[in-house]
Image: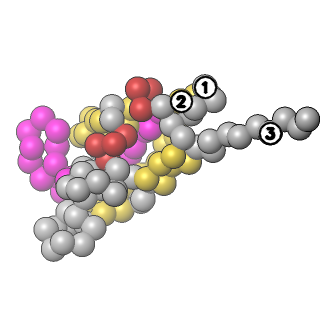
Amino acid sequence: TKFVTITDEFWVYIPNSFTPDNDGVNDKFCIEYNGIRDNTFLFKIMDSQGVLMYESRSPSELKCSGLDLGWDGKQYKTKYDLPSDTYLYEVSFQDFEGWKHKEYGTIILVR
């Protein structure tokens, strides 16, 4: 008898830039991921002053492979287009094995 352990490795791909200029190429900010618990996901985007610009609690809402999904570069309350700039992100989630993860980075929005 041999015991085999199969684990579902987690990974998250977060691009560092996008161009929401409605040219049909790279117009939405989206992520790809595997092995994370959807109900533990939180993704925030802030400006350089730390003011919240966008938030999602659903990773499938940001998934690149979905039709018309992702962040469109608009401020979440006003729905106004945000200017070209570097924005900060914070993402936290739990993988299928129960480990908690928190990552930080930047996203360049180019109009």
Q: Identify the colour scheme used.
A: secondary structure
Residue 84 colored magenta?
A: yes
With respect to residue 52, does 28 lie above or below? below
Q: Position of residue 13 (x, y in %)?
A: 48, 54
**Front residue of 12 and 15:** 12
Secondary element under disc 3, as helix, strand or loop, is loop
Mark pair 3, 1: CA separation: 20 Å
Residue at x 41%, y 59% (from the top left corner): 16
Any part of residue 86 in sight = no
Are discs 2 and 1 less than 8 Å apart at CB? yes
Q: Quadrant of the N terminus?
A: top right
Crowd tier of the residue under label 2, counting other residues whose Cα lies within 10 Å: few below 14, some 14–19, many 20 or above: some
In the rendered structure, which amino acid carries the disc numbered 3? Answer: Val
User: Which residue ends up furthest to the front in the rendered image?
Assistant: 1
Count of labels in the image:
3
> What residue would you read off at disc 3?
4
Label 2 to label 1: alpha-carbon separation: 6 Å
Q: Amino acid at mark 2?
A: Gln
**For mark 2, what is the residue?**
94
Above or below residue 67? Residue 91 is above
**Residue bearing mark 1:** 98
Mark closer to the observer (3, 1): 3
The reply, left or right, for residue 36 in relation to residue 1 is left
Which portion, as a residue range, is magenta?
72-92
Can residue 106 be seen from the camera position used here? yes
35 displayed left or right of 58? right
